Amino acid sequence: MRNVTVGLIQAATPFDPTWSVDKVKKAGLDLHIPFIEEAGKKGVQILGLQEIFNGPYFCPSQDTRWYDAAESVPGPTTELMQTYAKKYNMAMVVPVYEKEQAGVLYNTAAVLDHDGTYLGKYRKNHIPHTNGFWEKFFFKPGNMGYPVFQTRYAKIGVYICYDRHFPEGARLLGLNGAEIVFNPSATVAGLSQYLWKIEQPAHAVANGYFVAASNRVGTEAPWNIGKFYGTSYVVNPRGEFLATASEDKSELLVATCDLDQIEEVRKTWQFYRDRRPETYEGMVKL
């Protein structure tokens, strides 16, 4: 068996509207570091953090002060996380608000290897813009495709929050060789909650890989757009849930993924063999 220990952190972000952006980011880091340490001590080999982990989900606003939360990738936050990756021989998925240059901002996840090496980044491709989720005000659509990163333990891909509603990118991650796809999210109870445990297990089944999906918890004033309902989870290529977190508790979730299951499942379900890409041209013309 090729067992890999995967960890996900879900947390209720500490935030006071009177705080400066720098104080908000420091509070987010201070909340997560004990969980990161816990993951390292428990032998987690690949750790995923939640969407823009070191701050609140500020997209219910259209407040330009949050532009100041963006930083370069690699940059100060990823460099700090590199020290923890190296300390614990733990690969990491680190989602942050990225500033490429003035006015060019992305919703991004940096990927680090077990020795702290920066492997690259994924920029969220699908950007929602609807009541309570004004993301186009803050983020440009990603321009780096659907990369896969070879860590010491597994080939991993990243899909961020709203991306999960689009099977096309999920397929491309599989075609690019992903064995585990991480989906850091910030999603609240309501319209899409029933999809939370349907879509991504379906991606896992359709593509024969593992999915590790994280979601923050709690409510965030002053916006109060709803309750972030947690329930982070890991599913295998059969769509079976290996571990699920609580709905309202900041915690570390740990699961063991046997990567040999990918080969077993794909020997049964030959979806990649039986694909007909030459018949799909109409999909990109519409």
Image (cartoon, rainbow, N blue to C red):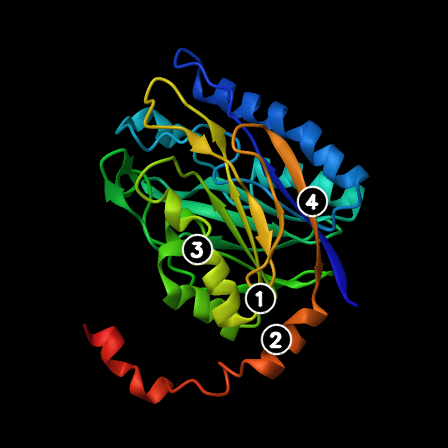
Label 4 or label 1, whichever lies nearer to me, is 1
Residue assigned mark 4? 254
Tag 4, which secondary structure? strand
Q: How crowded is mark 2: few (under 14 residues within 10 Å), some or many (20 or more)?
A: some
Residue assigned mark 3? 198
Residue assigned mark 1? 238
Tell me how far mark 1 sits from mark 3, CA to CA.
13 Å
Residue appearing at x 57%, y 28% in the figure:
249
Residue 215 in percent (x, y) is at: 49, 39
Q: How crowded is mark 1: few (under 14 residues within 10 Å), some or many (20 or more)?
A: some
Compared with 71, 183 (above or below) is below
Tell me how far mark 4 sits from mark 3, CA to CA.
21 Å
Q: Is residue 118 left or right of residue 104?
A: right
For badge 3, the amino acid type reads Ile
Towards the viewer: 281 or 23: 281
Tell me how far mark 4 sits from mark 1, CA to CA.
19 Å
For badge 2, the amino acid type reads Val
Tell me how far mark 4 sits from mark 2, CA to CA.
23 Å
Q: Earlier in the sequence, mark 1 or mark 2?
A: 1
Q: Which of marks 1 and 3 is nearer the N terminus?
A: 3
Residue appearing at x 42%, y 24% in the figure:
219
Towards the viewer: 120 or 201: 201
